[in-house]
Image (cartoon, rainbow, N blue to C red):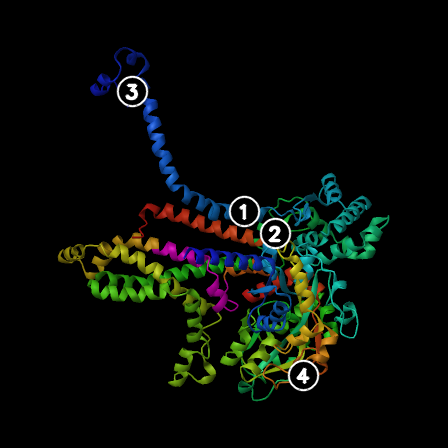
Amino acid sequence: MKKTLILTTALTGIAFAAQAEGEVTVMSWGGAYTKSQVEAYHKPFTAETGISVNSVDSDNPATPIKAQVEAGNVTVDVADVEFSDAVRLCDEGLLEEIDTAALPAAPDGTPAADDFIEGALQDCAVANIVWSTVFAYNKDNNPTAPDSIDDFFNTADFPGKRGLRKSAKATLEMALMADGVPAGEVYDLLETDEGVDRAFAKLDTIKDDIVWWEAGAQPPQLLADGEVSMSTAYNGRIFNAAVAEGQPLEVVWDGQILDFDLFVIPKGAPNKEAALDFIKFSTDTQRLADQASWISYGPARKSSGALVGVFNDGKTEMAPHMPTAAANLENALVNNFEFWVDRDAELNERFNAWLAQ
Amino acid sequence: MTDAPADPHLVTAAQPSSARSAGLTTADGQPLKAALNAAEAKAKWHAFFLVLPLFAFVLLTFVAPIGQLLYRSVHNPGFTTHKDLSTGAQTPIMTELREWFDNNPQGTEPDEAAYAALAKDLVLLRELKAPGSVGTRINYERSGSRSMFTKAARRAERLEAPFKEAMLDLDEDWADPEIWAAMRGASSAYTLNFYLAAVDLTRDTEGSITQVNENRQVYVTLFQRTLFLSLLITFLCFILAYPIAHLLATLPLRYSNLLMIFVLLPFWTSLLVRTTSWMVLLQSQGVVNDALVGTGILADADRIQMMYNQTGTIVAMVHILLPFMVLPLYSVMRPINPSYVRAARSLGATSWTAFRRIYFPQTIPGIGAGALLVFILAVGYYITPALVGGADGQLISNLIAFHMQKSLNWSLAAALASILLFGVLLLYWLYDRLIGIDNLKLG
């Protein structure tokens, strides 16, 4: 009996020691997205290095990171954040700088700096995916299929409720594009008061028909329930509902807004070395391509594009579902992070005031 | 007591001669007063150690965070101190410019010296990697300032005299009086500007207080709405709970216990489950609408919108807060002796008069307790309005959460939360003055 006790204690001790040595905590957004990262990054990383990966989720990882770093009690090693948050947190000194020269080159030898899409490498952040805000519709509730962003704002010809994210970001841009503003001029126009007025005037036309959502999992649910006939959504969530769950949902790529998700290391991360290894490993050409076979977000490396294959159901070709596919980019807007870092407070205040009216 | 030599026992117990002059003493010559005090102090210490865990708990989890919240709402050192998060070292920043502000009163046109000071400070910011946090601080007051700081800091080292021209070359917005007013306002870490912002006010370039632009006013409306909806929800809870509590209190115990389960069961169920159940029931493709359409009462096109608006917030919150009204009411109704009402009836009162003058006054302590509980909980409610409130069912707590989680403007969130806290304290004080808090009865 005593022997067993000693033995188990010793074993537990060893287990603990091993865990403390090789462990990295990664915070992401949950749902189908986290699952794609666990399959494409975490599991192969553990298999290759022996370092175990703890996966934690948050509605927006930027918030807990800010809180943890400011309180001096950091438990997260790697976080997956949006572009404007990555820039803002980095500017505020809350993130470790990442030496992007240390990232692995593409298989053909192209250095990482040239292989990543423009803007994907920042002082403190490395992009892993390109995602986009699109609008989607339920085929059962729309006898005529909408095919442009104008149709989203046209409740006369396309009756039914509309789902929109409760945030000024992406909403204002879409309103302007639906009002006939070419994608290239949207941010210039939003810099002016007239542009903002115009966007809100466009939103006014459908205000009574809008159901607001906040979490990425909501729009597929609202669409499937028939609670709304069209909704803006993150494209990967709609893909997941349509292809993996067989819901009658369809994405309209016209007027899509592209954005990056980036890996960052919070300042004072407990396993900084392992975190850096994890980022190097996860953002190499093959891993990024692998992730795209779990969810329809585009890889941030150019060299990964050719390797993107079929969905894990074994038959759905992923390439046409990527936000970065040529056919989907005809009328697309790239999110201007600098605009939002600057105007976030003002426009959201006005947006909240407009909502409360 | 020790000064009362009239007590014959004490006098005999004391030492005979010296006791007269030095007061009463114990057998070993200690003054009785001190001995008593010592004994009492010991008992007090024992009692204190017993409550010490609770005291520490309250201090740690309640007083300290609220203190920090209040402090954060008036203190934001974003423009005055830079803290290196890895070493914890604090460096004063913007010193040159703050000195210029000290030497030149509000309204002075920024001159070459001011721009030179700014340029010098920007060089330091660049070294400390702090332009982002400084820009964020100014961005709270004047939108669009953040990138001006990050851009200017990037080129600060190459700036040369005349600095005014050089800065304006970078971005002509540096001449905007608003940004100078914002920097002056932020040059002290202690500021009431966040409280101003929390009630839709701001400072203009002369430093006097004005309303913010009409299309950005939101907080006052939301405070009013929160107050109104909380009162309405409290009132609805009262209307619904009073008959239930009365029924529970008057039925024989075995029936009332069964009914009590129906009150308590939802009370024990997770808040999220109850809220989402209401979504299932009330949404436009939900159970209630389907039933109305199925029975032909409503046409398919006229489904009623009961969710994602104020109606949704009110219905779900009344349901969730109802037990907080039922339970205190029940606890005061249970011991009311039914013979009082019978006596009133036998003396000729109508059933209404007997209720109004005999029964109802005895339940007031329960109403007070229930109403206060429901109201205070409703004022701070967050998850339910966020889920079912849509656009016009939002409460002030949702905007506090917005500033905590999305805009990360914690000082403004703290200011909004403190106003809410003081509002509740004020109402509590009013309640105490009007009805009396000792009249409250929770069970």
Whole-angstrom CA distance, mark 3 to mark 1, is: 51 Å
To the question of a shared chain for discs 2 and 1, the answer is: no
In the rendered image, which residue does mark 1 sit on? B68
Chain of the residue where label 4 is placed in the rendered structure = A
Q: Secondary structure at mark 2?
A: helix
Residues marked 2 and 1 touching at CB (< 8 Å) = no
Q: Amino acid at mark 4?
A: Pro
Whole-angstrom CA distance, mark 2 to mark 1, is: 14 Å
Q: Position of residue B216 (x, y in %)?
A: 61, 60
Residue depicted at 67% across the width and 83% down the height = A320
Q: Main secondary structure of the magenta part?
A: helix
Q: Is residue B291 magenta?
A: no
Residue depicted at 55% across the width and 80% down the height = A241
Q: Which residues are magenta?
A: B370-394
Give me the disc on residue B26.
3
Residue depicted at 33% across the width and 28% down the height = B39
In the rendered image, which residue does mark 4 sit on? A320
Give me the disc on residue A70.
2
Is A105 displayed left or right of A357 in the figure?
A: right
Whole-angstrom CA distance, mark 1 to mark 4, is: 52 Å
Whole-angstrom CA distance, mark 3 to mark 4, is: 98 Å
Q: Secondary structure at mark 4?
A: helix
